[in-house]
Amino acid sequence: MNKLIYNYIKENRSRILDTWIQNMRNKADERLIKGVSTEVFESTSDEFVEMIISRLTEKEEEFLSLLTDFAEKVVRLGWPLVFVNEGLKEFEKIVYGGLVDQGLVNQDKLLEVVGDLDSFMTPMQNEVVNMYSQIWEKTVSLQKIALQELSAPLIPVLDRITVMPLVGTIDTERAKQIMENLLNGVVNHRSEVVLIDITGVPVVDTMVAHHIIQAAEAVRLVGAHCMLCGIRPEIAQTIVNLGINLNEITTKNSLQKGIEAALEITSRQIVEMEEVE
């Protein structure tokens, strides 16, 4: 890299940082500023400029390590990629402006300096975009896995009795998750009765009913009894109008009724105790 640019950045680091923070604060989205304290914004900005400068002084492995740490941090803070890209452009603009203001660049060296500065910033910008995208994809993937695990939980409520409460629409991908969780849960919890509660499912159409029937059949094959709870009047009417056959599945209109039936199947019952005076 051009030695003139290198020396200027190294000697004017503090001034470049202060100017960069001020300029980026003016350009930042109001929601970004409100969501981050002044201390966090300034410390993160300092890391950002430090990361850029490390491209000059550190080895490639050390720079990539700093870049990874920074990308993970700004993703957690919610900094948009557009803002990060704008930060790189602003850094280049500040450095070039400082060189010109101090008379360090004459007309003869203008094109050379601009070319060197661009050749320094452009590859780094590509690396920042690539790393940011990787971290973001990783974050989204982890969140998706977490949501999938929560979308079909199997909860042991009593010995040998488990409940799967379903909320929201059921598509093919979620149906697979339901099936997998049901079968694994029945074996792990040694369940004899599994209650699928569809109180929170807004629509039961042919596809949803088909998935539920498949799940119930799979549960029966591993030695447990499956019960469908939360059959609201409108859902019952829809099932009848669609001609869906649920004769092989025990149905209850509420989870409470389902648990009472599950207790009977496991040879237990709820008994009211008299108060002891």
Image (spheres, helix red, strand yellow):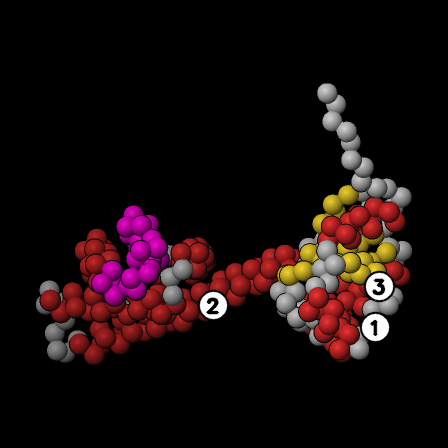
User: Which region shows up in magenta?
Assistant: 24-52
Name the amino acid type tagged 2: Ser
The residue carrying mark 2 is 133
Q: Residue at x 37, y 56 (%)?
A: 58
Image vertical order of residue 109 relative to residue 174, above or below: below
Quadrant in the rendering for residue 117: bottom left
Q: Which mark, residue 124? A: none
The residue carrying mark 3 is 249
Q: Nearer the viewer, residue 59 or 173?
A: 173
Name the amino acid type tagged 1: Asn
Percent position of residue 179, x then y: 76, 63
Label 3 Cα neighbours within 10 Å, binned few <14 / some 14-19 / many ≥20: some
For marks 3 and 2 on the same chain, the one whose residue lies earlier in the sequence: 2
Percent position of residue 40, x then y: 33, 50
The residue carrying mark 1 is 245
Q: Is residue 85 left or right of residue 168?
A: left
Name the amino acid type tagged 3: Ile
User: Does residue 107 belong to the magenta stretch?
Assistant: no
